[in-house]
Every structure is written in structure tokens, then in C-alpha cells.
Image (cartoon, rainbow, N blue to C red):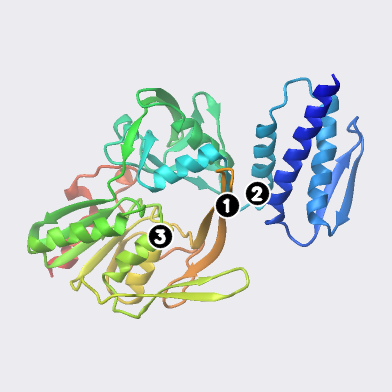
């Protein structure tokens, strides 16, 4: 019994030390902590400037309550992960979150463009606190099952998830080998549907390219993940050899990705040494990123956007619009004008934290505002949430073609 108590004490100390080290990096100057009597009858609030010790003391008090009262078994790792997740969630920033080691590995795999899952981009609707589908990946299990942009994912394998639990839902969706199935409950236009989808290895193809009539090139960017800019350049050069004289860049339903990839694409179009992006940190320190090379794309461009064009997509749209290098056609973009930094911790876990707000080269604000098109064109209402639209019915694409025919 004494040996068991000794192990429990060791576990407590290890958990508190690790958690304190991580959380100390994130704390503000003043902290408020609370503790309860073991019977839970009294809650007392204490202010302190000793942040690390306040967190440790708070956790120690709650741990005593758990040890003295909790009936089930205690998983130290789960307690630690839950404590950190809850602490970071207290920032109430929809884009800042803590990743466990497993979640970090999945996030990295997805960013590199190769992962196991159903192939769907999701976002948190902060107003309704629900998980919304931005877009399924082309030819993925999700696309084949009929999942569409705008669908709300309400349950995974019978478990309900809110927007605040998007990471947990994503992990649940992916946590299986290729060939296993997952049940996804979606809400579409007020109706609930359950889909059983088979997981598979999903390979991202960032760019879809095609030569249209009238020597118009078409490049659709699905995501700004690693390697996107290189693929964009290669696909453009292939179209250029086919004799295109103008270009449509389609970033509809592109939820973003790696900022540098969007900047490298912009660098192919904007004159060398021109400002591309202005970022501002918490201390109001501004940094400007400039074009590094002479432009390679010197032809009329139409950029297609919609309400699901977000983050890195808005960076590209803001740059091209600021320099009149493209006519923006479609609808207003999402309005995510903040940048996150991904930091790895020594145990393999990580934190994605909002560090900067970004502005267009003209210092125009994007966050919670979005970028308005030069020419607003809505899709027909019956087509707005469809993934595959016939070219002749795609009013936004047809407007782009009309402009470039002139």
C-alpha cells in the first residue's frame, strides 16, 4: 500500500512539473485560481502574481479532490492532456489549440499532403459552434460518399461533437487503418443524414489544370499545403507550352494552408521588391514580406473566390487585387486574417497558436471582414453547396471566361 501511495505521489509531481513548464510560456501577468473543500461546498478565489505556482496549487487542490473521491481509474496522461487542452481553450481563440502527440503527427501528415482518413476539409463555425465542411477532397471517400461544402458534421460514430471539439472529431474520423469504416452524421438544409464511409490513404493533389477554349488556362488550387507553389509553377508552365494567353485561378472552397506557399505563388506574378504581406504581432511590430523574383506570369488573370476561400487564399487574393494583377470574381471571402505558428514540444505534442494579424499590401484589414470581389457573381442557389458543377451552369466560371475573351 505504501509503495502504491509513493507511486501516486511521483505521478503527481511529474504531471505538475511538466504542466507548469508548458503553461508558464503562455500565462499572463495576473492569474486567478480557485480551490474547494473536499466536500465541494466552498469555492474560494485567490489573486496572485506567482503564475506558475498558482497553476500548480490549483491542480494540486483538484487532484486531492479526485484522489479522495473519484471512483474510477486515473490515467495520468489523459489528465495532463486534458488540463493543457482546457487551459489553451480558455483563450477562446478558434485557431489556437493544443495537439497531443498523435494529433500532431496527423496534422503534420495532412500538411505534407498524405494521410489516412476520409478526405475532408473542416472549419469551426464560431457563431453556431458547429463543425462545417469547407470541401471534400476530390476523388476522396468523403466526396464519393456525397459530403458537400456547407454540411455540418454533428456526430462521428454516434458521438456528438461541437465546433470546440473539432480536433477531437477529426482525430476520431482518422483513427483507423485503411479499409475500416466510420459513421458520419451530417446536417444539410435542416435534414440529418448518416453516412458510412470507408477510410483510405488520401493523397492531396493541390492543383487541377486544364486548357479551356480561347487559349484560357485554368488552375484550381485546392489547398496551400507543402509543395503547392512548386506544383502551381509546373502546371502553369505546361499550360504555357499549350499556348494559353490568359489565366483563371480558382481558389473557391480553399480553406488555406501554409502562408509561404501562397506568397511563392504571388511572387510569380508581382514585380520584384514589391510588398506582398504585412504582418503585425501582439506588440504592434510590423513586418513586411517582399517579392523576391521578377514575375513569370504576365497575362490577364481572373481570380475566383467564394465564402469558403480563407486564410492563405485571402492572402493571395489580397495581393493580386492590391496590384490590379487579377480581376476578382465571385463572392466575398471568409475573413480569416490571422496567422498561426506551429510549435513542437519535446514529447511530440504541439501547440498551434495565433501570433500575427495580416494585412494586404495596401494595409487593408482582412480578419472578420474578408475580401470583396471586383465583380460579384452568385452561383444559382441550388448549386451553391454542390462540389461538382457543370461548367455551363457555373456562373462564376462563365463570367471569368467572358472577361478573358474580350
Residue located 82% across and 50% down the image = 54
Q: Which mark is residue 96?
A: 1
Mark 1, other Cα within 10 Å: few <14 / some 14–19 / many ≥20: many
Mark 3 or mark 1: name the one nearer the start of the chain. Answer: 1
Q: Which residue is mark 2?
A: 88
**Residue at the bottom extreme of this rendering:** 273
Residue located 38% across and 39% down the image = 120
Q: Is residue 105 left or right of residue 207?
A: right
Residue located 42% across and 38% down the image = 151
Q: Which residue is mark 3?
A: 312
Calculate the distance from the C-alpha at mark 1 to the C-alpha at mark 2. Answer: 7 Å
Quadrant occupied by the C terminus: bottom left
Is residue 325 something that shows in the picture? yes
Q: Position of residue 178 (x, y in %)?
A: 36, 27
Is residue 377 something that shows in the picture? no
Q: Is residue 169 left or right of residue 404?
A: right
* Cβ atoms at labels 1 and 2 below 8 Å apart: yes
Q: Is residue 297 left or right of residue 308?
A: left
Q: Quadrant of residue 65?
A: top right
Mark 2 or mark 3: name the one nearer the start of the chain. Answer: 2
Asked which secondary structure carries label 1, the reply is loop
Q: Position of residue 108 (x, y in %)?
A: 44, 45
Q: Position of residue 106 (x, y in %)?
A: 46, 40
Quadrant occupied by the N terminus: top right
Residue located 81% across and 34% down the image = 63
Asked which secondary structure carries label 2, the reply is helix
Residue 392, compared with residue 115, is above or below; it is below
Asked which secondary structure carries label 3, the reply is helix
**Residue at the front extreme of this rendering:** 3
Amino acid at each position: 500500500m505504501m509503495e502504491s501511495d509513493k507511486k501516486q505521489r511521483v505521478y503527481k509531481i511529474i504531471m505538475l512539473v511538466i504542466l507548469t513548464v508548458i503553461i508558464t510560456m503562455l500565462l499572463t501577468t495576473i492569474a486567478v485560481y480557485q480551490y474547494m473543500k473536499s466536500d465541494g461546498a466552498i469555492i474560494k478565489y485567490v489573486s496572485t502574481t506567482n503564475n506558475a505556482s498558482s497553476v500548480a496549487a490549483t491542480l494540486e487542490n483538484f487532484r486531492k479532490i479526485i484522489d479522495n473521491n473519484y471512483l474510477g481509474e486515473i490515467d495520468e496522461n489523459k489528465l495532463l492532456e486534458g488540463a493543457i487542452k482546457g487551459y489553451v481553450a480558455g483563450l477562446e481563440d478558434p485557431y489556437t489549440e493544443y495537439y497531443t502527440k498523435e494529433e500532431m503527427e496527423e496534422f503534420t501528415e495532412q500538411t505534407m499532403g498524405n494521410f489516412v482518413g476520409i478526405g475532408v476539409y473542416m472549419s469551426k463555425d464560431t457563431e453556431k459552434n458547429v463543425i462545417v465542411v469547407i470541401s471534400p477532397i476530390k476523388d476522396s471517400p468523403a466526396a464519393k460518399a456525397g459530403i458537400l461544402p456547407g454540411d455540418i458534421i454533428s456526430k462521428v460514430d454516434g458521438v456528438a461533437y461541437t465546433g470546440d471539439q473539432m480536433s477531437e472529431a477529426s482525430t476520431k474520423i482518422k483513427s483507423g487503418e485503411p479499409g475500416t469504416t466510420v459513421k458520419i452524421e451530417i446536417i444539410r438544409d435542416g435534414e440529418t443524414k448518416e453516412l458510412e464511409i470507408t477510410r483510405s490513404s488520401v493523397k492531396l493533389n493541390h492543383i487541377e489544370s486544364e486548357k479551356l477554349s480561347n487559349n484560357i488556362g485554368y488552375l484550381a488550387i485546392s489547398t496551400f499545403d507543402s509543395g503547392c507553389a512548386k506544383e502551381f509553377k509546373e502546371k502553369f508552365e505546361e499550360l504555357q507550352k499549350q499556348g494559353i494567353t490568359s489565366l483563371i485561378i480558382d481558389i473557391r472552397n480553399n480553406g488555406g494552408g501554409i502562408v509561404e506557399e501562397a506568397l511563392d505563388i504571388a511572387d510569380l506574378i508581382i514585380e520584384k521588391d514589391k510588398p506582398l504581406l504585412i504582418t503585425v504581432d501582439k506588440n504592434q511590430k510590423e513586418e513586411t514580406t517582399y517579392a523576391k523574383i521578377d514575375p513569370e506570369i504576365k497575362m490577364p488573370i481572373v481570380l475566383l473566390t467564394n465564402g469558403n476561400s480563407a486564410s492563405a487564399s485571402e492572402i493571395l487574393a489580397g495581393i493580386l487585387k492590391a496590384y490590379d494583377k487579377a480581376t476578382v470574381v465571385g463572392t466575398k471571402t471568409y475573413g480569416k486574417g490571422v496567422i498561426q505558428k506551429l510549435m513542437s514540444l519535446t514529447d511530440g505534442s504541439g501547440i498551434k497558436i495565433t501570433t500575427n494579424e495580416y494585412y494586404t499590401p495596401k494595409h487593408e484589414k482582412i480578419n472578420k471582414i474578408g475580401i470583396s470581389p471586383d465583380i460579384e457573381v452568385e452561383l444559382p442557389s441550388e448549386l451553391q453547396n454542390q462540389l461538382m458543377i457543370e461548367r455551363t451552369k457555373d456562373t462564376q466560371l462563365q463570367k471569368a471566361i467572358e472577361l478573358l475573351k474580350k
